[in-house]
Every structure is written in C-alpha cells, then in structure tokens.
Amino acid sequence: MHRSQVADGGPDSSRGGNARPSWSTGTLVAGSNSAPAKRGNMNTGTLQFVVNLHRVRPAHILPSRLDSLFRRLGLAGDDAKSIEDEIWALWMHHPHQDAAQVLDRAACEIAAELFDIAETRLATLVRRCPDWPEVWHKRGTLYYLLNRDDESILDFHRTLELEPRHFGALCGVGEICLARGEWETALAAFKAALKLNPHLEDVKSTIARLEGHPPL
C-alpha cells in the first residue's frame, strides 16, 4: 500500500469516530519525547515486542465490551464488518467527551492533509491523555504519512503497550518494517494482526506473498 492511500479516505476520514486506517481492512516507549531508536536496535526490539505481545494487558481506560467483541470477531461471518466498526468506535471513545471531540477533529485534519494542525492537536492530546491508545495510534498514522517512520513506529509501540489487540497499529508496524526490508519482523506483525482480526484480506495476501516468495 502506498502511503498516500492511507490518507485518501483512510487513516481517519470525516467519518469521525468510525474512521479507520485503510490498512485495517492494520522497544517500549516512555512518552512522546522519546528519542527515535537506531534502526538496528529498532528491528530487534520490535520483533521481540510483537512476539511477546500476548503478555501485555489492555489499559484500564478501554471499555470492557471490547473483550466480547474480539471474541465475536474471531468467529464472525457476514457480521465481521459491523463488529470491526464497533471496535474502532470504542477505541475512539474517551470518558471525557471533550477529549473525544479533539481526536475527531485531528482525524478530520489528517484526512484533509492539514498535517501541521493535526500534529499540534495530537501532541497536546498525548500530554493530556497519555493512557489513551488511540491518540498514540492516530499520531503514529500521521507520522507514517509524513515518512517519519522512526517516530511512527514508536507511537505504534506505545499504542500496543496500552492496547495489545490493536490490529491497526500492528499493521502499521508491519508496513514500516516491510518498507525497510525487515521481513521477519513485518511477517510477525502481520500474523499477529491477522490472529486478532482474521478478516484482514489484504494482510492475508501480504503474508502469503512473504511466506511464498519473500523479497530478496
């Protein structure tokens, strides 16, 4: 997937709370000021992090309804899309309505390619709500669109620290690692995403391609 496709109705369109990264059909971080890791260390740390993700527990801020939705998603048939949409809506939810509205505005700004405004808004929101997974994921998506991959993958890591079931963040990690030629890490991330959401058809195709004909 080309990066421009993520913004084109993708990471976050004007659909607000239902907006999703287009890849979703996708070292631990102390905070937003963490320095980008060196690429070699990033690769090793990311692979270890993804492999051990099953040991991470979701943040308390997340709605408990997500547990049952993920169980249903794994068994879903024709209703998979509606279940996935509900998961995204709950990820976008915050107990404080004003915070949720700020994230919605940032999502719309990303879709409109108002990246500077969105980055400023998200930086403020990260400081205000550092335990909210989706604000980190949105900023990681923004950095991905801006080709700031080191910063993007750090924010995706932070997302997964708080919500280890975030298949969108895992797909983001996979996309970045794939672009860097880190095939083993990309494959691990994509497989982890597919285990959480077995209805990611593009991810299935990517996994099959990597396993059948890995890039040289």
Image (cartoon, rainbow, N blue to C red):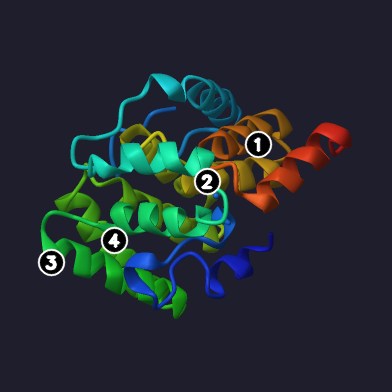
Distance CA(mark 1)–CA(mark 2)? 26 Å
Residue type of the residue flagged with mark 2: Ala
Quarter of the rendering occupied by the N terminus? bottom right
Question: Which residue matches tag 1?
Answer: 186
Mark 2, mark 4: which one is toward the viewer? 2
> Which quadrant of the figure has residue 194?
top right
**Residue 76's disc number:** 2
Q: Residue at x 15, y 52 (%)?
A: 128
Question: Which residue matches tag 4?
Answer: 122
Q: In terms of sequence position, does the residue under pointer 2 or pointer 4 come before the other?
A: 2
Between 205 and 180, the residue placed more toward the observer is 205
Question: Which residue matches tag 3?
Answer: 98
> Which quadrant of the figure has residue 65?
top left
Q: Residue at x 19, y 41 (%)?
A: 61
Between 204 and 83, the residue placed more toward the observer is 83
Residue type of the residue flagged with mark 3: Asp
Distance CA(mark 1)–CA(mark 3)? 36 Å
| Left-right relation of 198 to 126 | right
